[in-house]
Image: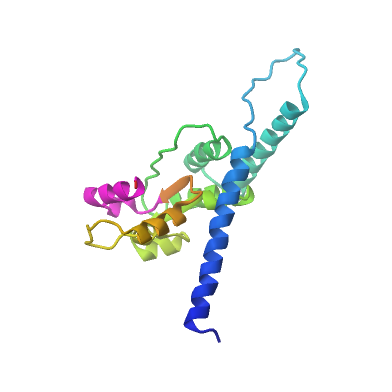
Amino acid sequence: MKSGNEWRASVGIKRQDAIQERITSKIRNSQSQNCPETIGQPNVVKVVGLSELESGQVKRQEDNMIDTISAEFLLNEEQDRAFRIAASHIVNRTADKLKMYIGGMAGTGKTRALKAIAALLERRGESRRLLIMAPTGTAAALLGGSTYHYILGMREGDDSSISQRILAAVKERMEGVDFVFFDEVSMLSCFDLYRICERIAL
């Protein structure tokens, strides 16, 4: 049985491994070339280099992966639309920031769309680019995420300035993250949203 210090050391090592994996994934993805958007024209011959030929092959593989995941998760029309919008931002690093609201009553498939997005990132080896947050532990646990209080180092009713130690921990958690999914956003007040935006901007 491990002592408290041994557990802390083990957790610290795992945390550093996770952070390093995030950084490595981000560097690898930033170095990969983006596929040029081309429109095929019949009866037109174009001489292309090996890199352009390979990038077209990569794009076809990505399209096939997106189609496969959509079929596996049995996405309906609205879910598929949300999934494909997110997927286009995942594979195209030069796209504008994605700001999307997925709303609907319970059981309409919001979680299914999110799980499809997470599956795409996982199959690309980029799971660390997605961070899932929620206002309560129960909501976060259902999606495999964490509370925003933990991720952003916030305590309920604490409006004091953030310490350098907590800020460093927050930056570690956010390292390599490109997509933040906030579940149960309707539970947040305007002031909560203000505090979250303020903390993310630090």
Q: Position of residue 114 (x, y in %)?
A: 49, 50
- Residue 82 in the image: above or below residue 146: above
User: Is residue 73 in view from this perspective?
Assistant: no
- Colouring used for the render: rainbow
Residue at x-position 56% and y-position 34%: 92
Is residue 183 shown in magenta?
A: yes
| Residue 88 appears in view | yes
Q: Nearer the viewer, residue 95 or 29?
A: 29
Of residues 81 and 188, the one nearer the viewer is: 188
Q: Which residues are magenta?
A: 182-201
Q: Is residue 170 magenta?
A: no
Name the quadrant of the N terminus: bottom right
| Residue 47 against residue 34 in the figure, above or below | above
Q: Quadrant of residue 161?
A: bottom left
Main secondary-structure element of the magenta-colored stretch: helix
Asked if 95 appears above or below 164 in the picture, the reply is: above
Image side of residue 72 versus residue 8, left or right: right
x 23%, y 61%: residue? 158
Q: Quadrant of residue 99?
A: top left
Q: Residue furthest bottom?
A: 1
In the image, what residue occupies the spot 73% across and 15% down? Answer: 42
Q: Position of residue 171 (x, y in %)?
A: 42, 53
Residue 97: horizontal and vertical position, in percent?
44, 36
Q: Is residue 7 left or right of residue 44?
A: left
Q: Residue furthest top?
A: 43
Where does the image place residue 60, in percent across and percent down from the top left? 69, 34
**Residue lying at 63% horizontally and 41% vertically, measured from the top left:** 67
- Give the mark count: 0
